[in-house]
Amino acid sequence: MKKIIALLGLAVLIGIATYSFAQENADTVDSLNNEQLGTDMATSPNSTLQKGDIPPQFTLQTLDEKQITLSELKGKKVILNFWATWCPPCKAEMPHMQKFHEQYGDEVEIVAVNLTSKDSGIDKIEQFVRDYELTFSIPLDETGDVGDAYEAITIPTSYIIGTDGRIQHKIVGPMDEAMMEQLISSTP
């Protein structure tokens, strides 16, 4: 009985900490304006990829066995996301990405590159996509070369690419719908 009470107490503490973290991040996102998004969320000075750069081009096979080529998306705003099934922040972000896709999918292309070379196998990826009911493109980075080119060391890592095909923002960590809306609205 003492173990059950201790576990319940621990669960409550974890819930409170998670809620506090989410509230702090939501407040931070709400306080950003478009000017701040352009500077605070730009790529870091240590990165080889900078705001305004043409991103590394790639062609990858998607989970549904189609090909996706980044350069073919020029003219459309793109959220290029790097993730894995075992990543808790990626799990938290995916429902937001799906809702964003459902609302803005005609205007913004979501390309969620699975870091397959670092993940737990195609079966787990397929199950993850089914569980989260994801309908946007899921290219598979089976060699890890694309993730490396985009410096996706911490995941999720996302790039916002403008209609001109240039990097506008780099975000390390999970995004929610409001954050995606702000980033996209500040992207030409």
Image (spheres, rainbow, N blue to C red):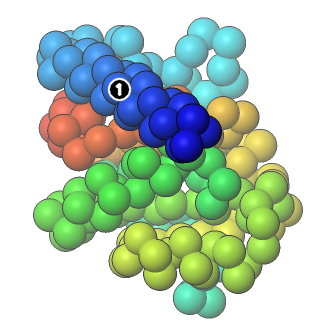
Identity of the residue furthest to the bottom in this view: 65
Q: Residue 161: x and y, percent? A: 40, 44
Is residue 119 placed above or below 30 in the rendered structure? below
Q: Does 109 sit left or right of 11 as displayed?
A: left
For the point 16% across and 21% down, which residue is it? 30
> What residue sits 42% from the left and 48% below the top?
92
Q: Amino acid at mark 1?
A: Ile
Specify the quadrant of the image occupied by residue 119.
bottom right
Q: Residue 97's x, y, as percent? A: 33, 56
Q: Quarter holding the N terminus?
A: top right
Question: Observer-nearest residue: 163 or 118?
Answer: 118
Q: Is residue 8 in sight in this rendering?
A: yes
Q: Would residue 117 be found to the left or right of residue 159 on screen?
A: right
Residue at 14 percent of width and 64 percent of height: 103
**Looking at the image, residue 34 lies above or below residue 126:** above
Classify 46 as above or below 18: above
Residue 185, position in %: x, y?
16, 38
From the image, which quarter does the C terminus lie in?
A: top left
Q: Position of residue 181 (x, y in %)?
A: 19, 42
Few, some or many C-alpha atoms within 10 Å of disc 1 (few <14, some 14-19, many ≥20)?
Answer: few
User: In the displayed image of the protein, which residue is found farthest to the front?
Assistant: 1
Determine whether 106 is above or below 177 in the image.
Answer: below
Mark 1 highlights which residue? 16
Count of numbered marks:
1
